[in-house]
């Protein structure tokens, strides 16, 4: 059952939960202690857990500053965060993962930094921790550099789950983001694409004590697909004109020597040139559709 938050506070801490009962035993008391003292709100989103997470979270609902949202079925990491963000009415939001790897004492530091810099989004940078796992770090490096080709940025830790948002902007953008684990990357790139102030702040990360991460190779593919979708939304011409230019370059470099040699026109070269023109036309159409879709950012209530 969802109980509305009546009084407006400065910060809401949102924690998505999926089968984290073992972690919640020690995470919940720590969060209640620090948030109770600071006057912050807490929203736990139980995303269809099948273990004892719901029962553990129920014990915290007696606190006036705590809200627990229950999903009957698992919606995904992004879906859980969307529910939490939609039910927030404070000026700022902090999201942390429910696996106990984030240091909750970093919340106040990153929150103060966001207010001092008047940042729209502050990302908890885990650069030192990433080096501890070579394969995971390499995968994130691929995603980061692929994203930079489509959407230029200087942020290092795109998919950190520890973030501070201006609530108004977070609510404005979440309908553009997926329900999957790719949410973290996509919402960061959305803030960047809309020329909001996005900064990073170093945080400490501890090893997961219990449970197992659900992030795998399929997550990387999801992120790449969502980055392409995001680029098609914000700047489709960059993709289509790039493909068009490549087709034209191949067609001309292939066909001109054949024409000069007096052997007629190459069918393959003409096909590449025609494809280039087709992709260029598709880019123009996609750009018009993007302009229409972007109106939803100014009028989110229409979605």
Image (cartoon, helix red, strand yellow):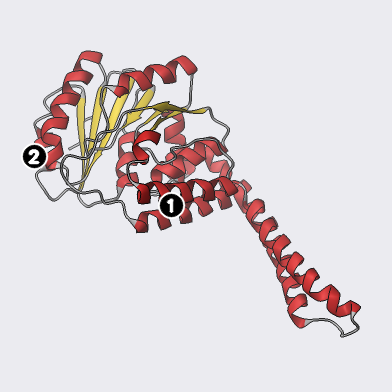
Q: Nearer the viewer, residue 25 or 237?
A: 25
Secondary structure beneath dot 1 equals helix
> How packed is label 1: few (under 14 Cα within 10 Å), some, or many (20 or more)?
many
Residue name at image x 34 percent, y 33 percent: 162
Does 114 sit above or below residue 171?
A: above
Labels 2 and 1: the sequence-earlier one: 2
Q: Nearer the viewer, residue 78 or 146?
A: 146
Residue 287 visible in image: no
> Could you say which disc has been placed on residue 223 in the image?
1
Residue name at image x 85 percent, y 73 percent: 256
Most extreme residue toward the bottom, as rendered?
A: 263
- Where is residue 259, by image quadrant? bottom right
Q: Nearer the viewer, residue 185 or 63?
A: 185
Q: Nearer the viewer, mark 2 or mark 1?
A: 1
Residue name at image x 41 percent, y 51 percent: 139
Q: State the separation of the CA atoms marked 2 and 1.
A: 33 Å
> Could you say which disc has been placed on residue 55 in the image?
2
- Using residue 300 as the reference point, say whether residue 28 is left or right of it: left
Residue name at image x 31 percent, y 46 percent: 77
User: Where, quadrant-wise, is the N terminus in this rendering?
Assistant: top left
Q: Where residue 136 appears, x then y in whole percent?
A: 36, 49
């Amino acid at each position: 059952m969802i109980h509305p938050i009546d009084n407006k506070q400065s910060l809401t801490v949102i924690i998505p939960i999926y089968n984290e009962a073992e972690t919640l035993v020690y995470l919940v008391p720590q969060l209640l202690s620090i948030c109770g003292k600071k006057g912050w709100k807490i929203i736990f989103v139980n995303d269809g857990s099948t273990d004892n997470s719901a029962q553990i979270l129920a014990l915290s609902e007696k606190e006036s500053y705590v809200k627990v949202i229950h999903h009957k079925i698992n919606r995904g990491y992004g879906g859980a965060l969307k529910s939490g963000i939609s039910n927030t009415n404070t000026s700022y939001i902090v999201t942390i993962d429910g696996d106990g790897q984030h240091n909750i004492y970093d919340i106040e530091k990153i929150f103060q930094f966001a207010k001092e810099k008047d940042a729209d989004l502050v990302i908890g940078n885990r650069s030192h921790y990433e080096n501890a796992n070579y394969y995971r770090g390499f995968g994130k490096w691929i995603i980061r550099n692929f994203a930079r080709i489509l959407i230029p940025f200087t942020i290092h830790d795109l998919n950190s789950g520890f973030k501070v948002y201006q609530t108004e902007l977070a609510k404005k953008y979440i309908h553009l983001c997926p329900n999957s684990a790719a949410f973290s990357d996509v919402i960061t790139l959305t803030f960047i694409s809309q020329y909001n102030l996005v900064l990073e702040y170093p945080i400490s990360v501890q090893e997961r004590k219990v449970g197992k991460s659900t992030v795998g190779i399929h997550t990387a593919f999801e992120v790449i697909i969502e980055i392409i979708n995001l680029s098609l939304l914000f700047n489709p011409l960059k993709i289509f004109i790039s493909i068009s230019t490549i087709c034209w370059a191949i067609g001309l470099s292939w066909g001109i020597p054949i024409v000069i040699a007096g052997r007629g026109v190459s069918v393959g070269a003409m096909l590449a040139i025609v494809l280039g023109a087709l992709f260029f036309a598709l880019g123009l159409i996609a750009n018009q559709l993007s302009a229409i879709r972007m109106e939803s950012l100014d009028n989110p209530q229409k979605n």
